[in-house]
Structure formats: structure tokens, C-alpha cells
Image (cartoon, rainbow, N blue to C red):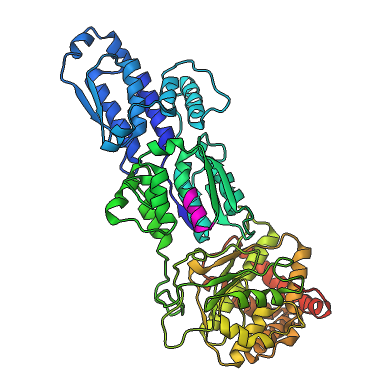
């Protein structure tokens, strides 16, 4: 899971700077990793203070009138509308009559002359008593709160930018995966935190608040609203990201309150429609996160609000590979460009006839050579939503099945004992799955995350035991091995789907006995041998506790080699699991043989 560093909120930072300038306090320091807009306002306020002193000093100075006679001070504000509006009010309130010229890029000059919420915010920050309106802009409300707070305690803390976070919500909605956005808070004053509700309702992106920020991931529940109706009056900066999310997900956007978009860094209504950057930082980031190209000469504009955007975007979109240790057998150089995603859902696409019926319908309806299978309760891998993804190694013979990795992860920051034991068990099982397949003798796989060649699946359909509604994945593995089909595997993090532990001992029992109940139907020699050896070791441990030592050594070896770290379990959990596992395994086998539970 990637952790994303966000820039500070330029809305909050610029208000802090203006309050510090108004009260004659020291301006907060700026650095190259801050948004360019913050640096622009900071430098302008510093030049103004260096030339004319603090506001109180200017008003009280005997030489104030003589200072007005000196050469005009020219402040170049680039394309920073906030700096322009704030300084226009600041000069009028604190430095009346000074010869200062505010200039900037041609686009800024086009935007000059019309009052905005920034103008109103600046007046409030300067102490004007302006009554609150019923439908007040969140930016104006932010200014009220900050002005009141500063009068009590000038040490206002900044926070990461929710406007910048919107592009990662866009990325996850379109491409899938999980990201942790560091530092974001539930109780933020920023209006663009509305992105949480918007992306949850319309695009299926779930937000989970953590001590270190928020985790976002794509829900497995299908999006139901085909029309996305949003008023952008108070959240204009979210428009590019939301517009391109709708376009990529083939949803209709019904946008209102868009009049202000014509006066942003670009005319965003036109720029979005034409897929043009127009030197607009939010246009560049929205296009890139949606998978659209951005000319190299226009990429630098993101520094206006997000200097480290390229660092984060490159790290997330350029998929990391393990070092060449011989473990990864499927790479990314490929001739495969599209797959169909198939998610069998009970009662939705199975006609209440079971998982295999659902899979048969989905795979027969697929128009691509390969089909990517997901269970409906997993978080899709990082690259699953990419329209241009490439996933297969170019070899003489393309694989008929690719076993993809799974990771069990708790939603809680503090997993329970039940969750930790499941995570440890699942980690060992997944390592066994990967390592056996890499040795050319696969004994396990999971339909929760797997890619199969469509014609290979159809060729094996008759061997999938239609009388058993589940078990399609293991029976498919057997059938493919019997036919000599090529089975590949990868353990690359970007192709890892996340599963959740069950929430009760009862649910765990039902799940495991259902798995074990299919064991007598397996005929593959490798699978039966692996199962037989496991049961033998369990029986020996029960008969002679000394066999617990080699059993623990085997489990620790699997867990030590497993990719992705511990994932929440402790060494004590592993010891406990190793002690109870023989009894637990035999009980599951016995329960599975007697159980009639199905998918």
C-alpha cells in the first residue's frame, strides 16, 4: 500500500500569512516543497513589509508621507488569484495610498477586476464585521474561524490539502488499489473535504480514517447512480477530477454552479471538454490521474499547488518490481493490453444457481482473450482498473492461467486476536501458493484474484464439478494441469488484491469447513500429496508434541519469506496458531466432510 505525501493547504497557509502580515507578526517560513502560490504571497508580503514596515509601523511613522514619494513597488504575482485578491484588500486597509503595482501573468490580469470569495475572506481577515450568509462559501467560513482563532492564539497549525487529495480519489476510482493520504483530518475546515462523500456515493471509493491520515480504496459494490449530480458553487477546484472520473467510468455528470470555473487558472469548462492543460495545475493533475497524456512542456505547472505531485505520481503509477531473485515469473512487458473483469455476485449474476453458473455467464460474455477474476468481497489490485495495463511476459507461449497474489488485511488499526490469527494463516497459505507455482508444481490458487485465458477456461468447464456450486478455482487448476496448460504466477505488489478476515469464530468455521469439504474431489497428484503431508504432520503433532517444533519451523519459514511483512500478526500469534492448528485443521476436515454448506 502506498503512502502519499500531500502539500500543505494553500488556502489555510495563505490565510495564516495574511493574518501574520496584518498583525505585524513574523511571517512563517516557506520552502521549495510548498505550493508556489504560498511562496508568491509570502514573498509579496515580505517585500511590502521591507519597503513600508508593518501596518502599525506604517500608520504611526512620521515618515509615512515621504515614503509615498519613492519609486513604485512592483509585485509580480504570477497566476496567483489568491495573492491578488488578498493584496488588493491588504493595501487598501493597511497601506492606503502607497505606490504599489500588482501585476502577474496575462491570465491573472484577465481574471482581475471581479470580486470573489477571496475578496470577502480578505475583508473578514482584516476585521470587517460581515454577517454570515445561510449558504456561505466554506472558504469564507474558514476565514471567519481562523480570524477568531488567531485573535486568541496566533499559533494556527496548517494541515494537508484536501483539494490535492481529490486527484488521488480520482486515481483510485479509475484505477483501483489502496492509498494512504498522510495527515488528512476528519474535522478539517477545508470545503474540499466534500470529496469524501462525493467519491463514496458516486464512485465507490471508501475512506477510512487512521491516526496517520486516511486510507482510500475502491469498494467492490457496483456503482448504481449513472447520473452524477453535483453543485460546484463552493467546490470549484474539484470539478476537473470529478469530470474525468465520470468520463472514465462512463457516467453522466450533471454539473451546476459552474460559473466561476471560467475565471480560474484556465477556463476549466472549456479545458476539461478539450482535454487541455492550458498551464492550469489542476487540469494537469486531473488529466494525468485519469490516464490522459500531458505534454512535457506543461507538466511543471503542478508546482503551483503540489510541488511533489510528480514524485508521488511516478512512484504510484510506475509499478515497482522485486529485485531479480528468481521469484517473480510474470513481468510487465507484454502484448496483452486489455482484460475483462469478472466478479461473480450471488443473486446478481448467478441467477441463484451458484458461482460456477455466474462465472460461465461472465466468461462467455467476455470479448477479450483474458478474463481477470475477482471475488465480490476483495479490494481490487492497484492496476486492475487501468485501461492500458500490460501484465503478461512476452514468451514463446502465453500462460493460460496467472495466479495473482492476495493479502489479508484488517480494516482496524488494531486487529483482534481472531483477525491476527487469520492474517498469519493466510500469509503462510499465500506463500505456499506462490512458491509451489514458481517451482512448476502449483497446489493452490484462488478465484479471488486470478487471470485466465478465456478459451482455456471454456475448455476446462466440463471438469469443474457442476454438482458442487463452489470450488471453481481449484478444480480449474487441476483441469489445466491435466491438459498440460501453462500456469504462471506473480507476487508483484501492484497485482495484489486485499481480502478481509471474517469477523466471528462462527464465520471462520463455516468458511474453512466449506473449503475442506471439497478436498475429497481433488485428483491432482501434487494437490493430494500436499494435503496428505499436511494432515500427516498434524496427526504426528497430536500424537507426539515434539513434532510441534518442525511444524513451527515450517510455518516460520513460510512467513519469513512472505512478501509484504507481517501485516498485523505477532510472533506470539504464530506460536499460538502453530499449537492449535493441528486440532483446528482436523476439525475443519471433519466438519467439511459432514457439512453441506456451499457458496
Residue 178 among magenta residues? no
Image coordinates of residue 211 in percent, x first then y, are: 56, 46
Residue 248 among magenta residues? yes
> Is 558 left or right of 154, judged from the image as shown?
right
Vertical position of residue 337 compared to residue 19: above or below: below
Q: How many marks?
A: 0
Residue at the image point whose x is 64% and y is 55% from the top? 224
Residue 230 seen anywhere in this rendered image of the structure: yes
| Range drawn in magenta | 242-250
Residue at the image point whose x is 57% and y is 40% from the top? 186
Image coordinates of residue 138 in percent, x first then y, are: 51, 31
How would you classify the magenta stretch by its main secondary structure? helix
Q: Residue 319 sits in which quadrant?
A: bottom left
Give the camera-side residue of 267 and 543.
267
Give the camera-side residue of 310 and 586.
310
> Is 41 left or right of 397, judged from the image as shown?
left
Amino acid at each position: 500500500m502506498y503512502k502519499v505525501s500531500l502539500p500543505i493547504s494553500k488556502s489555510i497557509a495563505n490565510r495564516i500569512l495574511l493574518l501574520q502580515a496584518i498583525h505585524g507578526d513574523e511571517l512563517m517560513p516557506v520552502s521549495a516543497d510548498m505550493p508556489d502560490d504560498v511562496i508568491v504571497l509570502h514573498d509579496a508580503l515580505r517585500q511590502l513589509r521591507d519597503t513600508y514596515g508593518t501596518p502599525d509601523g506604517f500608520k504611526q511613522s512620521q515618515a509615512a508621507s515621504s515614503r509615498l514619494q519613492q519609486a513604485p513597488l512592483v509585485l509580480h504575482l504570477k497566476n496567483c488569484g489568491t495573492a491578488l485578491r488578498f493584496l488588493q484588500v491588504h493595501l487598501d486597509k493597511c497601506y492606503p495610498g502607497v505606490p504599489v503595482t500588482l501585476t502577474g501573468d496575462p491570465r491573472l490580469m484577465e481574471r482581475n477586476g471581479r470580486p470573489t470569495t477571496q475578496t470577502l475572506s480578505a475583508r473578514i481577515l482584516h476585521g470587517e464585521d460581515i454577517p454570515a450568509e445561510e449558504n456561505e462559501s466554506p472558504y469564507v467560513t474558514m476565514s471567519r474561524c481562523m480570524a477568531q482563532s488567531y485573535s486568541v492564539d496566533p499559533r494556527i497549525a496548517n494541515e494537508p490539502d484536501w483539494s490535492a487529495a481529490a486527484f488521488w480519489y480520482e486515481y483510485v476510482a479509475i484505477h483501483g488499489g489502496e492509498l494512504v493520504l498522510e495527515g488528512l483530518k476528519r474535522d478539517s475546515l477545508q470545503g474540499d473535504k466534500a470529496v469524501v462523500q462525493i467519491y463514496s456515493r458516486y464512485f465507490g471509493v471508501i475512506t477510512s480514517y487512521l491516526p496517520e491520515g486516511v486510507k482510500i480504496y475502491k469498494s467492490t459494490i457496483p456503482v448504481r447512480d449513472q447520473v452524477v449530480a453535483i453543485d460546484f458553487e463552493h467546490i470549484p477546484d474539484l470539478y476537473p477530477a470529478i469530470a474525468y472520473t465520470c468520463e472514465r467510468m462512463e457516467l453522466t455528470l450533471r454539473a451546476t454552479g459552474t460559473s466561476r470555473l471560467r475565471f480560474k487558472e484556465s477556463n476549466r469548462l472549456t479545458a476539461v471538454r478539450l482535454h487541455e492543460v492550458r498551464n492550469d495545475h489542476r487540469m494537469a493533475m486531473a488529466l494525468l490521474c485519469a490516464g490522459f497524456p500531458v505534454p512535457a512542456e506543461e507538466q511543471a505547472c503542478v508546482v503551483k499547488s503540489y510541488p511533489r505531485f510528480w514524485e508521488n505520481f511516478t512512484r504510484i503509477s510506475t509499478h515497482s518490481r522485486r529485485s531479480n531473485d528468481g521469484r517473480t515469473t510474470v513481468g510487465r512487458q507484454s502484448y496483452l493490453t486489455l482484460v475483462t473483469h469478472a466478479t461473480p455476485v450471488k443473486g446478481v449474476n448467478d441467477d441463484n444457481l451458484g458461482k460456477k453458473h455466474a462465472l460461465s455467464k461472465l466468461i462467455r460474455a467476455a470479448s477479450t482473450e483474458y478474463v481477470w477474476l475477482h471475488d465480490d468481497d476483495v479490494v481490487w489490485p492497484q492496476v486492475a482498473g487501468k485501461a492500458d495495463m500490460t501484465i503478461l511476459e512476452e514468451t514463446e507461449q502465453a500462460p493460460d492461467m496467472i495466479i495473482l497474489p492476495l493479502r489479508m488485511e484488517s480494516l482496524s488499526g488494531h486487529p483482534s486476536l481472531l483477525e491476527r490469527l487469520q492474517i498469519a494463516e493466510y500469509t503462510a497459505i499465500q506463500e505456499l501458493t506462490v512458491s509451489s507455482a514458481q517451482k512448476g508444481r502449483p497446489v493452490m490458487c484462488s478465484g479471488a484474484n486470478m487471470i485466465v485465458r478465456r478459451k482455456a477456461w471454456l475448455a476446462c468447464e466440463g471438469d469443474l464439478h457442476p454438482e458442487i456450486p463452489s470450488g471453481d478455482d481449484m478444480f480449474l487448476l487441476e483441469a489445466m494441469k491435466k491438459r498440460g496448460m501453462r500456469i504462471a504466477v506473480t507476487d508483484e505488489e501492484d497485482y495484489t488484491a486485499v481480502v478481509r478476515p471474517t469477523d466471528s469464530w462462527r464465520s471462520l468455521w463455516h468458511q474453512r469447513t466449506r473449503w475442506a469439504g471439497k478436498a475429497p474431489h481433488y485428483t491432482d497428484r501434487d494437490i493430494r500429496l500436499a494435503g496428505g503431508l499436511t494432515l500427516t504432520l498434524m496427526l504426528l503433532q497430536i500424537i507426539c508434541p515434539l513434532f510441534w517444533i518442525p511444524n513451527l519451523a515450517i510455518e516460520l519459514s513460510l512467513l519469513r519469506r512472505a512478501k509484504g511483512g507481517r501485516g498485523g500478526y505477532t510472533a506470539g500469534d504464530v506460536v499460538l496458531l502453530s499449537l492449535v492448528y493441528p486440532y483446528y485443521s482436523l476439525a475443519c476436515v471433519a466438519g467439511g466432510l459432514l457439512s453441506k454448506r456451499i457458496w
